Amino acid sequence: MLIGFLINPIAGMGGSVGLKGTDGVLEEAIKRGAKEISGGRARKFLKSIEGVEGLKFLTASGKMGEDILREFNVPYEIVYSPPPRTSAEDTKKLCRFFLNRNVDLIVFVGGDGTARDVVEVIDSKIPILGIPSGVKMYSSVFAISPEKGGEIIRAILNGRVSIKDGEVLDIDEEKYRDNKLDIKLFGFAKVPFLEDFIQSSKSEYVGEDEEEAKKNIADFVVENMEKDTLYILGAGTTVAKIGERLGVEKTLLGIDALYNGKIVGRDLAERDILELLEKYSKVKLIITPIGSQGFIFGRGNQQLTARVLRRIGKENIIVIATPRKLGELKKLRIDMENGDFLKGYYKVLYSYGRYKLMKAE
């Protein structure tokens, strides 16, 4: 099988530093101490297919592919040499080489923006598979994790996958940083589908029943908040309803912190959260899963790193979700570096004082 392989080296760099993406703000991300993460995600994928025969990769030189591929015993060919600082145009140029060489599959490491760049060139001519490495991955073209991506490759070789249409969604990152969620359908891609290995597209839920459910959850949370405890509030409309109930301004898509009903930190980066954890001894974290996907960590909240979450403690994590959102989920998901300690069961608050036990894996 001939695989076109590309890495977006800057994908996801804005996550832990609170920039909600990297488009147009790479220099600011670097200034804030952001580190490249795509290489590590690519290594996990490639390690999961070590020893698999019958694979050859076409790729670009440097960080877009060659630097990682040469660490593994796999045949590869360089078909494009990008500049040291890569851009979306380099992704598109590399994809044109893949198209001309008639590869069987394109595997890319990145986020929704990378998926959009790939599909802009490929359209639906060649199946694609995303290895998640961005800040937000709302499109249904991504493997659940790098390791699941490797299992999909094995399944393709064994004839155990079907090809389905996957939605490629993208958001306006400037609006996203301004606390506005503007998701648009960019197009469709052919995706190798294996049940429970490819994520669904993110869903948004609206309606009177949905708002009433969020209100009931918020009422219960607020009425049971402990005094002299730092509450870290995750992203999403369900969590934002808690801020509304308290009469404080909660950022819709960022991580905020409350202490005794007052905001003590807004739109926090990993470093900000760690500073707060040094100051406050008692802490609770409130989060909600991504609709239709079930991710509680590793998608859209990379500020909540393993280092942060170890300090908070799994026992201090409160998961909330409306009945409609919960009804679409078979399980909760975690896709983050060194996050195995977070796996297991969580009580999910879905109404006033009502919980459902769900497994996170």
Image: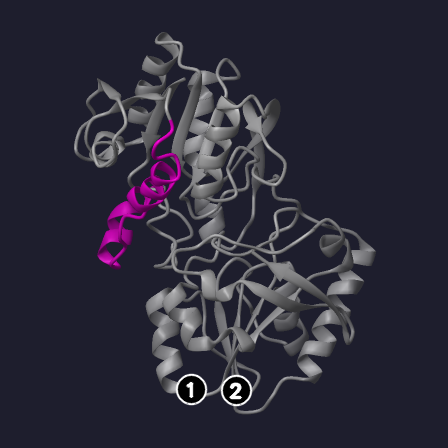
Q: Position of residue 299 (x, y in %)?
A: 49, 51
| Frontmost residue, 277 versus 333 | 333
Q: Is residue 168 above or below residue 199?
A: above
- Give yes or no for contact between labels 1 and 2 (Cβ–Cβ under 8 Å): yes
| 26 inside magenta stretch | yes
Residue at far left of view: 84
The secondary structure type at the circle numbered 2 is loop
Q: How is the image coloured?
A: one colour
Asked if residue 289 lies left or right of residue 354, the reply is left
Disc with the residue nearer the chain's start (1 vs 2):
2
C-alpha span from label 1 to label 2? 7 Å
Q: Which label sits on residue 318?
A: none
Tell me the crowding category of disc 2: few under 14, some 14 to 19, or many 20 or more residues within 10 angstroms, Cα based.
Answer: some
Q: Which label sits on residue 280?
A: 1
Asked if residue 29 lies left or right of residue 118, the reply is left
Question: Which residue has dot 2 on it?
Answer: 229
Q: Position of residue 270 (x, y in %)?
A: 36, 66
**What's under tag 2, amino acid-wise?**
Thr
| Frontmost residue, 335 versus 226 | 335
| Frontmost residue, 230 versus 261 | 230
Residue at 25 percent across and 24 percent down: it is 60
| Frontmost residue, 21 versus 277 | 277
The image quadrant that residue 236 belongs to is: bottom right
The secondary structure type at the circle numbered 1 is loop
Q: Is residue 269 above or below residue 311?
A: above
Query: Which quadrant of the rendered structure holds the C terminus?
Result: bottom right
Q: Is residue 3 above or below residue 42?
A: above
Residue at 24 percent across and 19 percent down: it is 77
The image quadrant that residue 238 belongs to is: bottom right
Q: Which residues are magenta?
A: 24-52
